[in-house]
Image: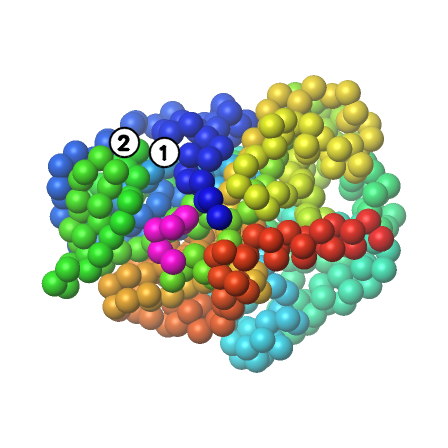
Amino acid sequence: MFTPNLLTANDKAGTYPASYYAATANTTAPFETIEGDQSCDIVVIGGGFTGLSSALHLAERGFDVILLEAHRVGWGASGRNGGQVGSGQRREQDDLEKMVGRDDAKKLWDIAEQSKDIVKSLITKHDIKCDWKPGILHADHRARFVSDTHAYTEKLQNEYGYNQIRTVDRAEMREMLGTEFYHGGSLDMGAGHIHPLNFALGIADAARVAGARIFENAVVTSYENQSGKVMVKTSNGAVVSANKVILGCNGYLDALEDRVAKRVMPINNFIIATEPLSDDLARDLIRDDVAVADSKFVINYYRLSADNRMLFGGGETYGYNFPKDIKSFVSPHMIEVYPQLKGVKIDYGWGGTLAITMNRMPFFRKIEDNIFTATGYSGHGVAMATLAGQIMADAVAGTMERFDVMSNLKIPVFPGGKALRFPLLVAAMVWYSIRDRL
């Protein structure tokens, strides 16, 4: 089966997509293009949240770090996503308790809480201008889901001591959101939302100040161990020699590392941004300016931008190519929730590629003694990928406690490996999309 290069299948080399985020990105000094052979302690491949956070935390520890980004820092999913900084892992605690037991499930919850904390602390410490706003509203699109949501909310309060979440009934939901689409849910004020590209750019600037060498337009073609060193080759002929490698490629890993690729799969997701809305209309749509994520399996997620645009994510594709008209692809999902936005001008529409795993938990591994990876955040990566960088920096420095908790998670290989993961997932997703409509 022909597999296109995911780095160029839908985008122009070295150029951010025409997104709202790119149009409102903070100005930052350019990063260099790599020339000639280089050497360092640690080479980080990928300039998204995982790689940038790894580079920052390693440089702060005194390591000589080189980061190689194929396009621009924050170019991939890190600069294109819904910007939601959510609580917990991608799977709920009930599921995790069955998967790993109560004690390890609590450790996973604590790590997830740390992931939100590190986002907030990096914003404060480095004065990152990324429009942080508190609150995520979970909205149930079926009445039968509400009792389970409320029971889970009470579990988090009573068993995990998490007091920043509360239940929301149908009447309050319809006061908070200007739609009759939902029947209840929960409000988590310990979570929040950000401008993700500006957050990524802020981490990049902080990493540069800490001493990390960041190179853009540095496509890594291969790497191999040679006499205790890892030799990383780039498309322009440069070779970086390092003691250790961190892979932070996520959905754009492609064929670089088959030992990881068979456990993660790239999928595409899409967002539109309306024209700026009036204050009255914006507050009618989302009264308290929180982010929203609903209960559909192919999730709708949305929020208001700093300038009152509706940023609405919806719809997924499981091939390689983006739809030709992303605005038309996503708009029906928005109009289903908010009929009053029919006819509102859509200024931006963009897509991105993320990575999922079979059980939707991230894949942390030490592939070899000197090669580390974290990937497969399954749509829950803004906070967790940022923390993953710190966790891997700790692991490289010899502190393995949190890395071990994450790497002990069993992440199944996709049935049929890379060859059959797409057709099998498409079949499954067709079933789930039908379920969403029932």
Nearer to us: label 2 or label 1: 1
**Residue located at (46% from left, 44% from top):** 2
Secondary structure, mark 1, is: loop
**Residue located at (71% from left, 63% from top):** 153
* Residue corresponding to mark 2: 31
Secondary structure, mark 2, is: loop
Amino acid identity at mark 2: Phe
Mark 1 neighbour class, 10 Å CA radius: few under 14, some 14 to 19, many 20 or more? many
Q: Which mark is residue 72?
A: 1
* Residue 107, above or below 292: below
- State how far apart marks 2 and 1 are (Cα): 8 Å
Coordinates of residue 354 in the picture (x, y in percent): 51, 47
Residue occupying the far front of the picture: 1
**Marks 1 and 2: in contact by CB < 8 Å?**
yes
User: In the image, which residues are magenta?
Assistant: 253-258
Magenta stretch holds residue 77: no
Coordinates of residue 282 in the picture (x, y in percent): 72, 29
Report whether 219 appears left or right of 93.
left
